[in-house]
Image (tube, helix red, strand yellow):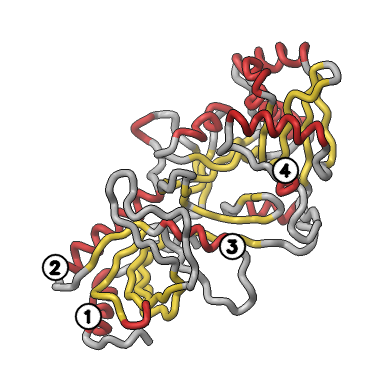
Amino acid sequence: MATHIIHPRQFLDPDQLDAFLERGWRPTGQSIYTSDYLRTDDDELHGCLQIRLPLKGFTFKKRHRKLLRRNGKRFTAQYAKAGFPDQELLAVNRRYMADHPDKTREDLEYNVINEAGQQVLNTHILRIFEGEQLVAFSYFDMGQRVIYAKAGIYDPRFASASLGLYTMLLEVQHALDLGFTHYYPGYYSPTFSAFDYKLRLGPMEYRDISAAEWRPHSTDPVAQPEDPLHLNREMLREAREALLAAGVRAEFREYPSFTGRFRPVQQGENVMLDAPQLLLIGRPLPLEFYFVLTYDNEVRRYRFDVVRTANLYDMRVQILSRQGVPRFTTPVVVHNRIVESERLSVIIRKVRERLAGTSPS
C-alpha cells in the first residue's frame, strides 16, 4: 500500500507506535500515515524513503558535540508533555513561518490534538530558552523504545545558533538517556534535497519498500537506495512498451491527486486510486470511467483497474509537470479491479480481453 492514513480514536499505546514505525508508517499530527511518494507545494512529485538512526553504539559527530557544548552554555532546555500551544509558542511559530512558509503550519494545535480534541499519541515538547525568552521548540512522539521527530521551529533571529539541528540533537540525546533503540527523523527524498540534512545526524538505516526491511543507508553517492518514484516509472515504462507491442494504446500520466487518499473517509466509501503514476489504457469509457494500469512497488505487482471520477476537484494540480510530463488531473476511485499480477503477460491478456468490449463493469 503506497499511501494510506489512519486516524486513531483512542490513545495509541507506545509499543503500538513502535510497531507502526517499524513497518514504515509515521505520525502526522495525531494520525498515522504511510506514503512512498511526496507531492511538494509547487505540485511536483518525488519518491521518499523512511529513515531511522540506530542508537546502539551511537556517538555524536565531533561537530555535533561542539554544537551541543556551545549551545548548552547559552540556552536551557525543558522537556514536557505537549499541551495546547500558548502565546509564546505561537509567536515563535509566526516569526518562523514568515521566513519558512512551507515548513510549518499556523495551527500548531494540529501537532498535539486531533479534530475531536484528543491527544492519541504520546506527544512531547522540547522548549529552548535564552534566559526567559523562548527561542525554539520541537514536538516529538514517544513510543516504548523510540522517538519520532515531528516538528522543529525556531526564531529566525537566532538562526546562527543552528537551533533546528540543535533540537534534533537534544532529542537524540534524550532517546539515548532513556535507553531507546532508535530515533526516527521521518523521511528524505532522493530527488528533493530539502530533507537531506536528516541524513547527516549519523549512520542511518532506510526502509526498503519492496523487501519490507530496514537496511544500512550508504554514504557512497553511487550506492544510494533506488528512488521509489523512478522505480515505479520504469515498471510502467516497461508495461507501456509491452502493451504498444501488443497493439494496445497506453499513455503515461502522472497522478498528483494520489494525495486525496489522505482525506478522512466514511466507512464503506470508495477508496481513491493509490498510485502516483499510471497508464491510461485504450480510450475513455462512457460516464467518466477509465481503464488504468498502475504498479505497486511494495507488493511488486501491476494492477489493471476500472476507475471512475470521484466527483472531487483538485485545485492544486497542474496539467503538466515542470519537466513537461502530462498529468491525469481528475481524482478517481477504483470502481473494479480487473486483475493484479506481477506478470506482464497476464496483464496484457486481460487488457486485450477487456478492450474487446467496452463495459466498465
Q: Tell me the kind of residue under disc 4.
A: Leu
The disc placed on residue 245 is 2
Residue drawn at (34%, 75%), measured in percent from left and top?
Answer: 290
Q: Is the residue 295 above or below the residue 152 in the image?
A: below
Left or right side of 301 for 250: left
Q: Which residue is mark 4?
A: 108
Left or right side of 223 for 121: right
- Find numbered disc 2 in the image and state the secondary structure of the residue it sits on: helix
In front: label 4 or label 2: 4
Q: Is the residue 21 above or below the residue 257 in the image?
A: above
Q: CA distance from mark 1 to mark 4?
A: 52 Å
The disc placed on residue 352 is 1
- Sequence-wise, the earlier of marks 1 and 4 is 4
Residue drawn at (65%, 30%), measured in percent from left and top?
Answer: 96
**What crowding class fits label 3: few (fewer than 14 Cα within 10 Å), some (14-19), or many (20 or more)?**
few
**What crowding class fits label 2: few (fewer than 14 Cα within 10 Å), some (14-19), or many (20 or more)?**
few
Residue drawn at (64%, 27%), measured in percent from left and top?
Answer: 164
- Sequence-wise, the earlier of marks 3 and 2 is 2
Residue 152 locus on image (x, y percent): 67, 33
- Sequence-wise, the earlier of marks 4 and 3 is 4
Q: Which residue is mark 3?
A: 263
Q: Tell me the kind of residue under disc 2.
A: Ala
Q: CA distance from mark 3 to mark 1?
A: 35 Å
- Find numbered disc 4 in the image and state the secondary structure of the residue it sits on: helix
Q: CA distance from mark 1 to mark 2?
A: 12 Å
